[in-house]
Image (tube, rainbow, N blue to C red):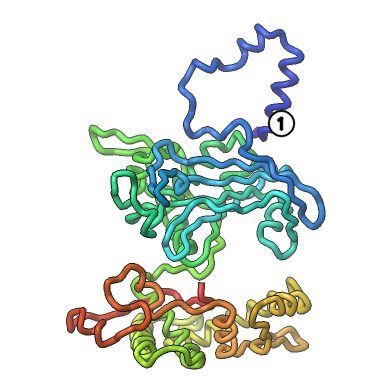
Amino acid sequence: MKLNLLKQTTILVVLALLIPTGLLSALLPSATSASPDPLALPTTPTATLHVTVDGVPLTVYHYKVVYVANPVPVVSGGVVTFNFQSMNIYVPENATEDSPIILQDNNGGWNGGTAGNSVTDGANYNGTNNKVGQALKAGYVIANVGCRSRVPGRNQDVNGNYIAHAPAQAVDVKAAIRYLRHNDAAMPGDTNRIIITGTSGGGALGVAIAASGNSPEYYRYLYQLGAAGVTCDEANGTCTSTLDDDLFGTVLYCAITDLDHMDAAYEWLYNATRAELGIYSAAQMDASRWLKVNYQAYFNGLGLNDEDGNQLTAPLFLDAIKALSEKEIEDAYVEVGPGQMAADIAALSYPDSSWYSVDAFGKGTVDMDKYLYFVVQNRALKGIPAADNVGSPLPFIPPYSLVLFRSAVPEDFECYCGSVVVLNSL
């Protein structure tokens, strides 16, 4: 049976009091009998945090670890750091050996990033509608994992090598999963119940991790980093693993999985909203419409069918998104109630609730035009195009020049620049 660190320490203290020193030292492993395990969970927490959940005090043990034995030395802000391959693990005092583990990735925009801080010392969390508060109240272990970044200024190692080429982010998160399983006996939490969560590029990374669990194609990359459980025979070029890196489940939002079509999908959804805002130049709106048309043609050519076997075209896809949004409104109406929904919207900078309604029978209705306008008033839209303007030598960042763009690429170039449709502007 697995014991948490607090219980282990208590047992050792009791043994020290009851057993003669010579006999106790003979029972415990010698400090010099083997090399220290570079991937062992620290024997003491990095910090002990004191929070409240729904007003009830709760102690949370925080461990900051580097999850590989051979981390890449990243130069960030002129400083060498291993933080991009680090992980913050939060173990609430009410966690048990059966507690699920929530694995939060950091890959917004496919940019990668350092491990985030999920739990703040002294904070008061709501255990009903705050995700951290809910997890802590239920005794879940939270692990927030960093991964290598492609952002200029933090995308090179000490030798100037670029560090974030695919599949770097996926390899890093797989290594973090292996670290948790390697230390399964040393901490509460069930490593057979790891649930990954992320948004946008983080959602897409979660998809990649979930779809490739235990794939041998990643073994050599993991081995080079010194990830737990992987060995390679250089003589015959084979690698084996004693640990798994698969997942129990996913909670992923707005996953950018179709990178080739992300820009066009974004404009397909938000082109009319951009026109309503009236803040874009004619050239920018020309570019937006061009991408929108590209996406419609691409989507209609996929040959998709709905659940009834009918052809799913772009207009019907928008109807499906509307129906899903209405279902979410209905679920929220039941789960958190109309009062909390109204309070949440009232707290926003653009507190408009006219885009949805719920009738006496609990049936939700969403006005998509008003909803999209509500979204962009509370969070600014991305540029045109939404993603591929980052670091591009082409004049994608406003002011956008479609003439220059078209003159810079071959005549037979086809731009299907977009991904999944997102209902927010993350």
Would you say residue 273 is visible in this rendering? yes
Asked where in the image residue 249 lies, by quadrant, the reply is bottom right
Amino acid type for the residue under numbered disc 1? Lys
Extreme residue toward the front, this view: 78
Is residue 17 shown above or below 134? above
Quarter holding residue 205: bottom left
Residue depicted at x 24% and y 35%: 236
Q: Which residue is mark 1?
A: 7
Residue 297 seen in render: no
Q: Residue at x 55, y 51 (%)?
A: 144
The residue closer to the viewer here, 332 or 161, is: 161
State the residue in front, 208 or 282. Answer: 282
Which structural element holds mark 1?
Answer: helix
Q: Residue visible at 67% across and 82% down?
A: 351
Q: How many marks?
A: 1
Asked if 202 appears above or below 141 in the picture, the reply is below
Foreground residue, 271 or 23?
271
Residue at the outermost right position: 55
What is the crowding at mark 1: few (fewer than 14 residues within 10 Å), some, or many (at least 20)? few
